Image: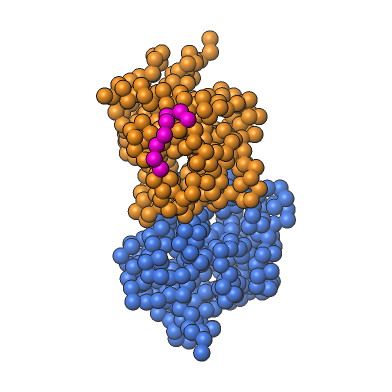
Chain colours: A blue, B orange
Amino acid sequence: MKKTKKVLILGGGGFIGRNLAEELLKDRACSVTVFDAAPGGEAPAGGRYEFVHGNFLVEAELEKVFKGRRFDAVVHLVSTSLPAGSAQSEMVYDIESNLVSTIRLLGLMHKYKAPRIVFVSSGGTVYGLPDRESGEKGILETHATDPICSHGIIKLAIEKYIQMHGYLYGLKYLILRISNPYGEHHASEVQGLFNVALRRALAKEPVTVFGDGGNVRDFIYIKDCVKAVKALMDRNVAGEVVNVGSGTGLSVNEALGLVKEVAGGFRIKREPARRFDVRRAVLDISKLKALTGFQPTPVLAGLKNTYNWLIKERKCRH
Amino acid sequence: MKKTKKVLILGGGGFIGRNLAEELLKDRACSVTVFDAAPGGEAPAGGRYEFVHGNFLVEAELEKVFKGRRFDAVVHLVSTSLPAGSAQSEMVYDIESNLVSTIRLLGLMHKYKAPRIVFVSSGGTVYGLPDRESGEKGILETHATDPICSHGIIKLAIEKYIQMHGYLYGLKYLILRISNPYGEHHASEVQGLFNVALRRALAKEPVTVFGDGGNVRDFIYIKDCVKAVKALMDRNVAGEVVNVGSGTGLSVNEALGLVKEVAGGFRIKREPARRFDVRRAVLDISKLKALTGFQPTPVLAGLKNTYNWLIKERKCRH
């Protein structure tokens, strides 16, 4: 009999984590432990699920989840910063929370012999301004990494520390540079263009657009995203940095057009362009495709699912 | 009349700083303020020199040096970590001291309108393991940056934050990836192969060698190094990352042979090779040459000067 694959998801109560836990639990050979600072919501169906409440930033709390448990893989989804925040106090907090805590995590994984880490990095920020060719054709994993926001610099530094632990201590790692995920279980009121626009449309409130709306982004449906993560984990891909996106660019204006198609009209509130927003950032996903046979869901289909989930979720709350 | 160029050297009391201050003060159009946590030694000849005692890690002490002074350029030489230290506690300290303090420095430079930073990064660690071609021909500035020690990761993260401040706030920057400097004013008892070997030879003590002594490094004479820094500053080179080295590789064994030639024989103590030591790391310095016409001093000449300085320094102490 195949051994159960025990996966710890740090920050597993959030948007990506909820979806990933569901995806992993579809596989009867997987068990999932979620560690999160927010109270645990409803457990996904299927059993083999455990929720541990604790703060990633407090080493003693993080250590508790390792004590007496054995994990085959740790998925690290915790992030305390947003791409937009690059004020000085935010930078220092970004460093002290995300980077220092991840160093401590790597120490604990070494101590408790957790052999594998999956780190969710940021496909939207680690590359910085794409060079001309990558701006047109899509950004490869080998592209220069010169972030223009603190969030991206810290994600990159974490990648480097993980790779160093791979080299020095044999830690198996998988670094995923994810583009802009949207879809079910996105509970934030402020993050994610599709998520925010759908919520504003439903609430009959205006959607804020920075600049002319011509900035182009790569949006990935969250169900595709977590399927890709599972597929890479199943294949034991290690020592690799992999872009996870749709590989297709949509301008903010095009994206909002689709939201209108799905959820009806809404007003737009224009704000000045932000200096740290890259003009065009679309990932080249040939590597992911070659490794897993990945095929993205058409965006309109993903968006309709998201809309239906959001309506249901709003009904439940009211 | 040309305006005096006011330069602040952070960590200016150390090895590179002492030499740089001397070099800058040869130019009558320069004035130098040194900020250092160690007590200030003898002031270099020529006047136009000021020493401010303070701790770079304490923001209020760092701010004092900016208050009421105006600087055209800030040279950042402070580093609290060594390439060898990658234990977990050292990593966390590395992050909290070097990285966080540099963020604060960038904030102060913005606040006090200091327009230019010269950052001394690490040509020996930021590149990590050179790819095959670079291992043979020398490492270009465009080489991948995958450090295998914490020191290198933090130097790299600092580079990224500086570049981000360049992009977002117009900070002029010059990032220097310096190889292994040796020469006068190297006061450390433990750092620098040439420095340590000369000191051990003079003290009739054994020199420790890790591994077979076949590791190849790029050694740069400190007088060449600071001349190069001055030349780049004089040309207002900005927005660039520049390798500063001799461009020539010497194995540890070859280097110790030269020390023997200069200082006489000594015993060698062999220790096992260290995993984080790169086999061959020699910089490609074509960019520096193109920008400044740089020509390195022959190593035997530099080494003799260093030896003579060391003998004089030992006499003064005894």
Of residues B273 and A121, the one nearer the viewer is B273
Locate residue A135 relative to residue B261 in the image: left or right.
right
Q: Position of residue A311 (x, y in %)?
A: 54, 75
Of residues B86 and B110, the one nearer the viewer is B86
Of residues B75 and B252, the one nearer the viewer is B252
Residue pictured at 39% horizontal, 40% vertical = B267
Q: Position of residue B148 (x, y in %)?
A: 49, 52
Residue pictured at 38% horizontal, 34% vertical = B201
Relative to A38, residue B188 above or below: above
Q: Is residue B16 visible?
A: no
The span shown in magenta is: B261-268
User: Magenta segment: does it hold A203?
Assistant: no
Q: Is residue B202 visible?
A: yes
User: Magenta segment: does it hold B267?
Assistant: yes
Locate residue A248 relative to residue A97 in the image: left or right.
right
Locate residue A238 relative to residue B268 in the image: left or right.
right
